[in-house]
Amino acid sequence: MVGNAGANVADTLVPYDVLASTGRFNVYTVAPERRTVPLLGGLDLVPDLDFAQLSRRLGGRAPDVTVVPEMPSDKDGDRRVIAWLRSTASRGLVLSVCTGARLVAEAGLLDGREATTHWYRLAGLQDAHPAVHWRRGVRYVDAGNVITTGGLLSSVDGTLRVIERLAGTGTAAAAARTAGWRHYSPGAPARMPESRLSPSNAIVHLLNLGYRSNTSTVGVVLTGGVGELELASVFSPYAEVKAARTVAIASTATVRSRHGLTFVPRARLAGVGDDVDRLMVPGAAAAANPDPEIAATARRAGVPLEYPHRRPGFAFGPVLGSMARTFDRPTARWTRKILEYPTADLGSSGPRWPWTPTLRVLLFGLAGVAALAVVRIGARLITTGSLRSRTANRKAGGSPGGGRDNPDEGEEEP
């Protein structure tokens, strides 16, 4: 599912790819209305069906599985999604991913059950939905006809659990290998630390949010047949921690992914210039057969060109390694924590601290101190000038207003 206001890019595309890659599921993206919707990070998706079209296709039956990602809060859209979850999806298996649990809880499908969600949002959902038995430190909770997952990449484990139940452990293990996911735990969720926000996490996030997110742009070049998981791996990390703005670029008006999703780029390749700081081309297929037009565009714009998926493996790993090298290692570690990625080789290169945004903070601070000093000096000059003026008037025998120094002299009290 995606809402009319869109959805989280990783929550949506990762389960989609893992399910579709098995060849055992017919997977569709569905929204209340069929119109282009934004996924987090600047990637626009055209849903396959709206609710009414899906109902006609299934003859009024419920889908076997409904995946509910995080969706931006949207009053009308939320109302329609919640109603559909209650009336239709609840008759099948529901998989909530990350804070997609918010909508599933509001539909009443988690009351009296154990459930989980992203560690960063868990406290808020506990307050909003006290009838749910929320759990920390687990990748997923299987509560019968509802499975809830932790954040973002915990969706891989939750999706593999769905595959186990509906297509068998062998199919789930094959799907894990196809995705390059080495953390599959058959029959039970893998262990996960109980994460919480640390002071250093907060500082790094604020530095990126305030002093880097609006000054760094990564152009993501979409190519036909790119894997959905590969796409998510480039958009999601930068968007989640606000390390950079990502924008979808292509040479065509629309792009079809490996398993048939339709995306609409926000910029054309021919128009790329100095508005981007680097170009990234997701996908193993694109890396194996580089497009000369993309290389020419990078040369013309004078920006680095990167193919992150040259080697096999889980798609998010090399993107986090690139983030450590080109941004800094603390930002990459914070991103890994937010994504709930168990391990990622971040390498030993890259700055040990986000010095660029830190220096911007210091420069802004110094500029503020300098401005305050100028204001104070100006105020002192004005005060000194006023005192000198009054002194000169007294010496001349007058007052600043032109009257006598003692207006009562020689006059009777009224």
Image (cartoon, rainbow, N blue to C red):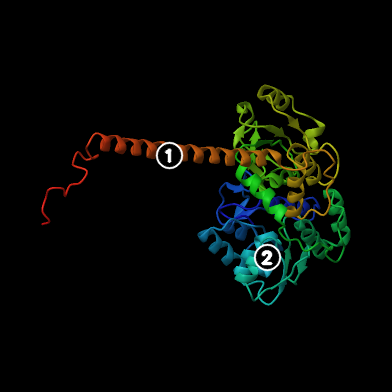
**In the displayed structure image, the side of residue 372 where residue 194 appears, left or right:** right
133 is higher (above) or lower (below) than 252: below
Residue 194: give x, y in percent of width and height: 77, 64
Tell me the distance, in whole angstroms, between the alpha carbons under discs 1 and 2.
54 Å
Indicate the quadrant containing the N terminus: top left, top right, bottom left or bottom right: bottom right
**In the displayed structure image, the side of residue 403 where residue 342 appears, left or right:** right
Residue 225: give x, y in percent of width and height: 74, 39
Could you tell which of marks 1 and 2 lies nearer the N-terminus? Answer: 2
Q: What residue type is labelled 2?
A: Leu
Please indicate, yes or no, whether residue 264 appears anywhere in the rendered image: no
Secondary element under disc 1, as helix, strand or loop, is helix
The residue depicted at 75 percent of the width and 37 percent of the height is 326
Q: In which quarter of the image is residue 161?
A: bottom right
The residue nearer to you, when weighing 414 against 233, is 414
Indicate the quadrant containing the C terminus: top left, top right, bottom left or bottom right: bottom left
* Residue placed under numbered mark 2 in the picture: 122
The residue nearer to you, when weighing 403 against 212, is 403
The residue depicted at 34 percent of the width and 38 percent of the height is 386
Mark number, residue 343: none
Secondary element under disc 2, as helix, strand or loop, is helix
Q: Say how many tags the image has.
A: 2
Residue 112: give x, y in percent of width and height: 68, 77
Mark 1–mark 2 contact, CB under 8 Å?
A: no
* Residue placed under numbered mark 1 in the picture: 380
Q: What residue type is labelled 1?
A: Arg
Q: Quadrant of residue 100?
A: bottom right
Residue 2: give x, y in percent of width and height: 62, 55
Foreground mark, 1 or 2?
1
